[in-house]
Amino acid sequence: MTDSHIARKRFGQNFLSDPNIIRKIVEAIRPRPDDVMVEIGPGLGAMTDPLLAALKHLHVVEIDRDLIARLHHNYPAERLTVHEGDALKFDFGSLGEKIRVVGNLPYNISTPLLFHLAAFADQVEDMHFMLQKEVVERMVAEPSSPEYGRLSVMLQYRFAMAKLFIVPPGAFRPAPKVDSAIVRMAPHAELPYPAKDEALLGRIVTAAFSQRRKTLRNTLRDFVAPEDWEALGMDAGLRAEALGVSEFVAIANRLADTLHHAKP
Ligand code: SAM
């Protein structure tokens, strides 16, 4: 096969081309021969090659038919299992009990993909992703910072996360417009603040951040009654950005108990 693939914008294709950056990413991942690993969006194989040098076998999920044909051509089926289709619909739970997930993710679907993957956290050992730097900063943000929001709370609820290093646009072909960063995510062995009803937690966090400048009294008025604020010992005059994961969980657990969430 020739090397003449034309990058498709609709699939968020920016291919890694800097060997030093590729080496640095694979070193951060530390693949071990027997890992059950899946790479999302292998593309032209920039990371697939060095990963397979360390692994006995690798799963990949790829949506682009031209790239899928190339992958079948370039790698033997016993080393590389190609799952053809949309990673947003892929059942990562079907791969095993302790899977490692990696990928230079298509940026246009990164947030829904992170939420999709969070659903499989019980079966995940760790995940390493390249994302837009700005998205990584939102993921790891602390309360009361401008980057802190729904993504921070919902991912920090389930994962310990670390921003590892920045990757400049020049490391890709074609070069994206923005900086990227590598993030490591590992599911908490035990949830530090377990929610009784995670769907309810998700609805509360979404509502609280839907209008960042408004107070919690306002954004959560369909959920939280004045006596709940009192019982929780929380100031309803604060904004969502002031609350940590533990406080959002406290609100959700209070409502799960008192069933004040009948309205929404
Ligand atoms: N890993 C390669 C690299 O680093 O050079 C390619 C990275 S490129 C940013 C994103 C890859 O994800 C492309 O190969 C693209 O075709 C694939 N992709 C895009 N949307 C996808 C989806 N919904 N499901 C699976 N793969 C997808």
Image (cartoon, rainbow, N blue to C red):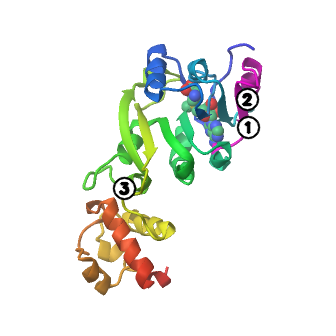
Q: Quote the CA–CA distance across marks 1 and 2.
A: 7 Å
Instruction: Please give the residue where the numbered disc 2 appears in the rendered image.
Output: 68
Foreground mark, 1 or 3?
A: 1
Q: Secondary structure at mark 1?
A: strand
Q: Amino acid at mark 2?
A: Ile
Q: Which residue matches tag 1?
A: 84
Q: Could you tell whether 157 is left or right of 66 in the image?
A: left
Q: Nearer the viewer, residue 21 or 6?
A: 21
Residues 232 and 45: in front is 232
* 76 vs 121: above or below: above
Q: Residue at the bottom extreme? A: 227
Mark sitting earlier along the chain (1/2): 2
First reached walking from the N terminus: tag 1 or tag 3: 1
Q: Quadrant of the N terminus?
A: top right
Label 1 amino acid?
Answer: Glu
- Residue drawn 40% across and 73% down? 253
Q: Which mark is residue 149?
A: 3
Label disc, if present, on residue 124 of the rendered structure:
none
Range of magenta residues: 68-87
Q: Secondary structure at mark 2?
A: helix
What's the CA distance linking mark 1 and mark 3?
A: 33 Å
Mark 1 in CB contact with mark 2 (< 8 angstroms)? yes
- Ligand 1, seen in the image, is in the quarter at top right
